Structure formats: C-alpha cells, structure tokens
Image (cartoon, helix red, strand yellow):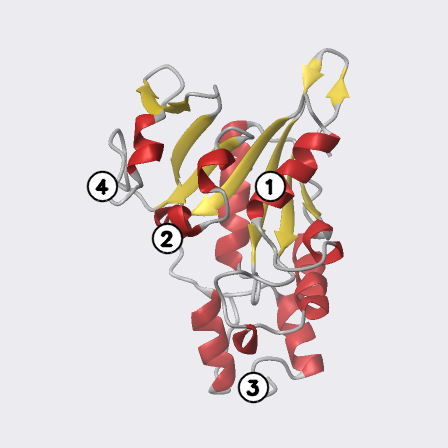
Amino acid sequence: MTIKAGSEEIKVGLFGGTFNPIHLGHLRGAEEVRESFGLKTVAFIPAAIPPHKSLEEVVEVRHRLEMIRLAVTTNSSFSLSDVEIKRPGRSYSIDTIRHFRKEYPEGHLYFILGGDAFTEIETWKEFPSLFSLCNFIVMARPGFWKTSLPAQLPEVLKQALRYDREVKGWIHSSGHTLHFQEITFLDISSTKVRELLERGESVRYLIPGEVETYIRRYGLYGKKL
C-alpha cells in the first residue's frame, strides 16, 4: 500500500473502525484528511471483532466489508483492507499498524480516527506504543483542540508530545506527529443511522445510495427500507 515512486515516498492513511454501517460522515472526513495531508490513498479497515463494542450490535463482518466496498469504489483514492478480518481474535489497532509498518518499513503511515475515539486512547491495547509506530490524525469539529492537549489524556502521552508551529501539530518523542484536523461537521453517526433503520425511517443522504440498497436487500438493522 505504501510504496516508493522514484525518490518520493507515498503517504497512506489507515482508517480503522467498525463501520456499522459506513456513512457519509466517514467518507467526507476521510476525503478532507486525504486532501489536507496529501495522502495517496486512504485504506478503510473494518474491525472483525471490535474490542470496545458488543457483537450483538454489530452486523456480520461480511456485510460491513461489502458495504465499505460499495461506498469507496467510486473514489480512486480510497481502498479497502481486510487485514483485520483475516487476523484471528479481536481487532486491535496496534496489531494492524504493526502489520503495515512491517510490510512497508519506509512508508509514511497516518492512522485516522475521530475525536471521541481519541479521548479513549488509554483503553487501547499497548496505547503508549501506538505513537512510536506511525503518525496520527484526529478528525475534529471546528474549534476542537487547537494548541492544547485535552486534560483527559493520560500523562504518559502528554509527556511524550510537544507542539510544533511549523508542522501545525504535536511531535511525539519518536518523531511521529499528531494532528487535530478540523473537518466539515456532518451530524451523522452509525448509531443514528441504525436507529432510523430500526424505525423504518429514511436514511437517504446519510449513507451512500449503494449502501442503502444493500441494507434493503439483506434486511439489515431492523425493518426493510
């Protein structure tokens, strides 16, 4: 995924999540991050067994995989990775990052996540090691964390970061960067989409049309559309 074209190293975004289901907020956020950071591609990486969610609330991974494929197929800068599906057991980000770091040791990797997920980073497996392996981009609402780190971050992480005006972000002691990137705020969540579907209400303009058709075909998330 991260390869060299001559002397130019290509930047790759790693966008992990449950995507239950994928929606336009995911897609627009990834597109704005890709453009802002000059990423060659953004890989959407669905979790097979998400560590922080009840499996009762998550549809089968084969359905989530196919919905992502349908959602990203029209964007040549987006791709789909099944690395977490092929790996047995729970899907931990640290294992996924190590996979890509081992495969592309000289690549510039950027792990993309939302602001809510970032505030819970201390609960992630081996979280102190995450920032030693790749760069991080936190998708944030306008006005969300400019030049100060949130107070709820673990102290061990705060001590390893320093703000740099030139890079307009935080630099980890490993040399990797942490950015809080403001994106267009779309008040859409997978939870909201599921609730609408369960009530038999419209989800048009919240998820891609192809994904809506797929959900209707397989009767996912409650009532058929």
Amino acid type at mark 4: Ala
Please state the horizontal and vertical placement of residue 215, each as a whole percent of the image.
Answer: 64, 76
Q: Earlier in the sequence, mark 4 or mark 1?
A: 1
Amino acid type at mark 2: Asp
Mark 3 near mark 2, Cβ–Cβ under 8 Å?
no
* Residue bearing mark 3: 222
Quarter of image, res 18: bottom right
Q: Earlier in the sequence, mark 2 or mark 1?
A: 1
- Left or right relative to 218: residue 146: left
Label 2 vs label 4: CA separation? 14 Å
Q: Which quadrant is home to the N terminus?
A: top right
Bin the neighbour count of mark 4 within 10 Å (Cα to Cα): few under 14, some 14-19, many 20 and up.
Answer: few
Q: Which mark is residue 116?
A: 2
Foreground tag (3 vs 2):
2
Q: Residue at x 72, y 11 (%)?
A: 7
Q: Residue at x 30, y 41 (%)?
A: 153
Label 1 vs label 3: CA separation? 30 Å
* Residue bearing mark 1: 14
Amino acid type at mark 1: Leu
Element under disc 1 = strand
Label 3 vs label 4: CA separation? 39 Å
* Residue bearing mark 4: 151
